[in-house]
Image (spheres, grey):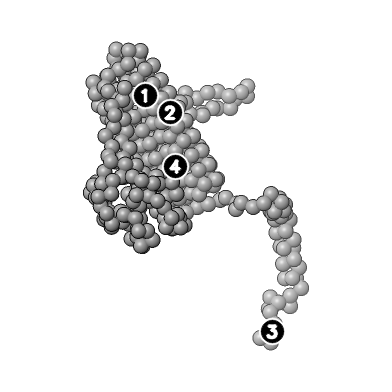
């Protein structure tokens, strides 16, 4: 059984010491859990990060709240004042909800190849399969049903959740989290069209993941065709993302769910990509780029900034009328060009149509 986590309760003063910020009000208030402004009650701490919820703050029954200094006067409750309420909330949530730590060792029905190297401090659960020559580092937690392919390497303290698959030669760094059903190292979609059909191209690169990377449930990362597919340190990937072969994702980049990234894309550092964005192959996205959800990116974006290509939500009837007008743009442009040509032909020679008296 997992070891029981140690989690509070803590006084508000103790939380401030551990997570930062200053206390206003009763620092001896006991806190056992986090909750929303609307639902929090005795022993619970809530937070305000978005000013649109100011009314909920005023009405909240939370034992304490986390607020920015400009909102501290909106509540009489004990409060932790910080310039980054959401970051403080994240730290408090981690403090009050530490992860359970399974005991080290391997379950009796785990299948570990004799040539694999699994640290004695690692926890390997039931039905795990670890292939020949694979390495699993100190303090790793490998949950039930995980498959770690031959010659793969998993860095210290990495957690792999149930039924995730690391194909052979996959490399994962330290302190990563790989959620259930994720697949790292499946073949990239490499096909050559011949006269009689498709010829599959062997995918001989790897997937290489840096340190402190989170990979969401059912996300797939294809191995490289020749070079490696690389996810750099501190990248954060949501659920159900598709990453094609030979992609490189820069450090500290965050990608929301259902994004599709075609092969050989280069994404820089500190980027943010919204859910369901689609990125065409063989393009480059520079450092510090933000892409709105649902955007189709078909060309390189070398300069930092915020990019969007999503048509605003509208009623179906209005959207259809707009779509019809959009389809007629070519016709309209041709008519405007013809009208301009006619006007130029009618204009007095020599003055381009301007009034000669002015």
Q: Which is closer to the viewer, label 3 or label 4? A: 4
Task: Please report the residue visible at 40 percent of the width from the left and 46 percent of the height from the top.
Answer: 40
* Badge 4 element: strand
The answer to whether residue 242 is left or right of residue 250 is right
Foreground of the two, 28 or 37: 28
Residue at far bottom of view: 357
**Residue 356: mark:** 3
Q: Which residue is mark 2?
A: 180
**Residue 305: mark:** none
Query: Looking at the picture, does residue 231 appear above or below residue 270?
Result: above
Q: Measure how far apart labels 3 and 4 are at the Cα level.
A: 61 Å
Q: Which is closer to the viewer, label 3 or label 1? A: 1
Query: Looking at the picture, does residue 293 appear above or below residue 336?
Result: above
Task: Please report the residue visible at 75 percent of the width from the left and 66 percent of the height from the top.
Answer: 339
Question: Whole-percent x and y of residue 112?
Answer: 32, 15
Task: Please report the residue visible at 67 percent of the width from the left and 51 percent of the height from the top.
Answer: 315
Q: Which is closer to the viewer, label 4 or label 1? A: 1
Q: Which residue is mark 1?
A: 143
Query: Looking at the picture, does residue 221 appear above or below residue 336?
Result: above
- Quarter of the rendering occupied by the C terminus: bottom right
């Amino acid at each position: 059984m997992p070891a029981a986590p140690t989690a509070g309760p803590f006084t508000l003063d103790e939380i401030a010491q551990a997570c930062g910020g200053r206390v206003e009000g009763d620092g001896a208030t006991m806190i056992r859990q986090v909750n929303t402004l609307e639902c929090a009650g005795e022993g619970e701490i809530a937070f305000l990060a978005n000013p649109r919820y100011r009314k909920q703050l005023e009405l909240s029954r939370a034992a304490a709240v986390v607020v920015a200094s400009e909102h501290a006067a909106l509540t009489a409750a004990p409060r932790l004042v910080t310039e980054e309420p959401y970051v403080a909330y994240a730290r408090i949530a981690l403090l009050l909800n530490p992860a359970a730590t399974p005991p080290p060792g391997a379950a009796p029905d785990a299948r570990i190849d004799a040539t694999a190297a699994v640290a004695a401090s690692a926890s390997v659960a039931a039905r795990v399969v670890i292939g020949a020559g694979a390495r699993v580092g100190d303090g790793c937690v490998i949950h039930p049903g995980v498959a770690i392919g031959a010659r793969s390497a998993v860095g210290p303290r990495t957690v792999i959740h149930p039924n995730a698959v690391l194909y052979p030669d996959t490399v994962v760094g330290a302190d990563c989290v790989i959620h259930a059903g994720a697949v790292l190292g499946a073949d990239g979609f490499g096909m050559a069209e011949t006269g009689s059909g498709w010829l599959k191209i062997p995918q001989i690169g790897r997937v290489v993941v840096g340190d402190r990377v989170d990979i969401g449930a059912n996300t797939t990362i294809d191995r490289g065709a020749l070079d490696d597919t690389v996810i750099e340190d501190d990248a954060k990937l949501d659920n159900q993302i598709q990453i094609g072969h030979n992609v490189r994702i820069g450090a500290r980049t965050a990608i929301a769910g259902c994004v599709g990234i075609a092969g050989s894309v280069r994404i820089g550092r500190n980027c943010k990509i919204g859910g369901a964005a689609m990125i065409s192959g063989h393009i480059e996205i520079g450092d510090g780029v933000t892409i709105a959800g649902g955007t189709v990116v078909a060309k390189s974006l070398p300069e930092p900034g915020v990019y969007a290509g999503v048509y605003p939500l509208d009623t179906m009837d209005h959207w259809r009328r707009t779509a019809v007008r959009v389809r007629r743009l070519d016709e309209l442009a041709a008519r405007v060009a013809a009208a301009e040509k006619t006007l130029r032909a009618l204009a007095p020679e020599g003055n381009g149509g301007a009034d000669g008296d002015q």
